[in-house]
Amino acid sequence: MESRRRESTIRRTIGGEKGMTNIGELVLMCQPLVMLFTTAAEELPACQRVCGDVEIPYPFGIGPPHCSREGFNLTCNKTEDGRGYKPFVFNVEVINISLPLGQARIYNAISWQCNYKNLSYFDWHLNFINTPYRLSNTRNKFTAIGCQTLAYIGDPTNVNNRYQSGCVSMCQNNKSLTDGSCSGMGCCQTSIPAGLSYYNVSFDDNFDNSGVQSFNPCSFAVLLEEDQFEFQSTYVTTLDFYYKNRWPEGKAPVVLDWRIGDETCEEAQRNKKAYACISNHSHCVASPNGPGYLCNCSSGYRGNPYVLGADGCQDINECDDPRTCSESATCTNTPGNFSCSCPPGTHGNPQNGGTCYPNNKLSLTVKLVIVNQLFWFLARRMLMRVKKRYFQQNGGWQLLHEIRSNQGLAFKIFTKEELEQATNKFDKSSVLGHGGYGTVYKGILTDNRTVAIKKSKMIDERLKKEFGKEMIILSQINHKNVVKLLGCCLEVEVPMLVYEFVSNGTLFQLIHEKSHRVPISLDLHLKVASESAGALAYLHSSASPPIIHGDVKPSNILLDDNYTAKVSDFGASMLVPMDETQCATLVQGTCGYLDPEVLQTYHLTDKSDVYSFGVVLLELLTGKKALYFEGSEDEKSLASTFISAMKENQLLQLLDSQIKNEEDMDVIQEVAELANQCLNFRGQERPSMDEVAEKLDRLRKFKLHPWVQHPEEIERLLEESLNYHETDTTRHYSLEKKAALDIESGR
């Protein structure tokens, strides 16, 4: 009843006196106002410079045409909700204006779609075409909230460069929602391009959301200021998102970039009559969001660069700040600058925290202090040089260039100090595990994110220059069953990698360690195997360029709290030379997973990963390690034992007692046959990872449908499973229909 009352309130408020129809629509038409252009921006009388609690600096203005520059006129109106008077651009409320940033914050209406007895929704658009305003692509994110929700943002007005994108938000129940996380589960965010002046929101009603209506009454979509939003799970299960944003209107803050004209600085300065930067000590800067320019005060000055006189750019008196010079020094202010001088009889640099020293003979203590500071300075300078050299050797400049040229790339270059702070200087208590390539630590970043930090042992000098390029490739891997690469540190001899933290240990611990041992059903076996195979198939077939894992084993398959598999340490073969990879693998005792062909050819292929995955399947079936002891006998190879057992029809004796079940033997036999194919000595005769993943997916779906009895039903189910594998997991919507759209998932 509560959700119905809230929905009713929304309908009465937005619907107006006419009420809400099945398709509620409110359109904001922003037509540019024709104003008298003023060439003299010097302040004239009777110009209102404050509306409510908001300052209105020129070129903005309220009232007569001379109070504002063309296109920057605002109105000061009384709000309908009783908050007093506020400035408005057209009929949109302005929150504040920044001259140095060239930005204005406004309130943007939240679009919504609700499902009660009938479908009802409210779409919204903003039109700032032919005005000084553009939607900020650096401060805003298009945000969609809800389950089974697809919301679109677009600009259909630009015929030559039509823009449209979307955001998909999925969830099957409210247990999958996480406060503070907007990564596709109940909440999705995506960026917008630069230069966007038109904003239109709509929902795709082809999604079948009948299964989520019981806990998700409404879906919401809005372009909003990214820093002002933090997802709460109640935004999906209630109407809190609408209530908390300027109820009763339902509006969220959004940032506009504004600029003067469409000319470059060079072009604008040729027309002195129309040039906006008229204050003394002001200069022109290019607009960061499309054509046009802004005005800033010169260094050492502050004020309004768009006007003359006392309100224009004025000198900053740095001497008003007692911290500018040391306590004993004399501060002298100069136009746009300042100086600090020591008292007579002393010398030194009293600026920026420096000190004045007596001119007479220095005491031993002072000398020791100076020597100590000099030593510290030289040591720090040497350390900075070493860091810079390592950064350059590890391809840091190329990586930095790639990051700057790909604004949507969520990849960070960490400093050594940041990672030392996150791991308490790589304390032993932070160690998660050791591998053939190095040690993995648990770390907590300054933003409270928990991460896994891999500190490698070695890297081929020949690959260092390509390291930055490889990091870009690996960071763009976006698969739910592959551990996400978040960043790296290049200030050290061997680069460190920063991954997302996966909380529930490894598959090796789940199978083999008693402290982690829990009853493992065949369903869980198939789930982990299918998800891991899908991740490897993605690396082989969908990554660009394809990536060979090179070290597939249970300890490199992580598990989250829901036992979802996440493949880690992918791309190791790209970062370590082949001879060292082989040596590290043998020394770490994981040769039980190594492709026999690699020992002969010294060449890793995608079929090498298939062989290693076959051994992982054996461990899931038998509960034994790749190299194991039986009684007092010598160490045995699980792969060799299994192949012999298959030839002698002795599979049953090898199986883990937890999965022995006559009802499941058909499925177990299929998995065993698949593992046998993966272990074929000739790599060319092994299946591809795509084929392995497809087979495991079919077996998993078959296992989940125990009611199927007849052969024709089994065949139909397997065919449906294959079709399911080839379609989007939503089951309700085909992305093929939207092939023209670049729909970002916000991950």
Image (cartoon, rainbow, N blue to C red):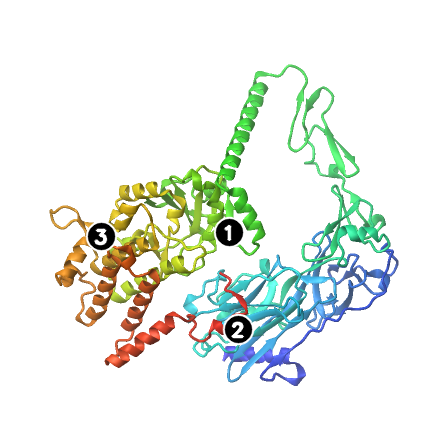
Please determine whether, in this image, residue 668 is positioned above or below residue 379: below
Tag 2, which secondary structure?
strand
Tell me the residue that label 3 is attached to. Answer: 625
Viewer-closest of 681 and 187: 681
Q: Which structural element holds mark 1?
A: loop
The dot on residue 411 is 1
Where 702 falls versus 495 (above or below)?
A: below
**Residue 194 x/y as whole percent:** 64, 59
Name the residue rendered at 37%, 47% in the picture.
Answer: 573
> Mark 3 or mark 1, which is nearer the start of the sequence?
1
Disc number lying in front (3 or 2): 3
Residue placed farthest to the top in the image? Answer: 361
SS under mark 3: loop
Q: Which is nearer the N-term, disc 1 or disc 2?
A: 2
- Name the residue type under label 2: Ser
Specify whether residue 577 is in view: yes
Image position, residue 618 (x, y; %)? 23, 58
Separation of residues labelled 1 and 2 (CA atoms): 30 Å
Q: Is residue 195 above or below residue 424?
A: below
Towards the viewer: 676 or 293: 676
| Residue 203: quadrant of the picture | bottom right
Q: Nearer the viewer, mark 1 or mark 2?
A: 1
Give the residue at mark 2.
219
Q: Is residue 418 left or right of residue 79?
A: left
Amino acid type assigned to the residue bearing label 3 in the image = Lys
Q: Is residue 449 left or right of residue 378?
A: left
Cα distance between the residues tagged 3 and 2: 49 Å
> x, y (%) of residue 484?
43, 55
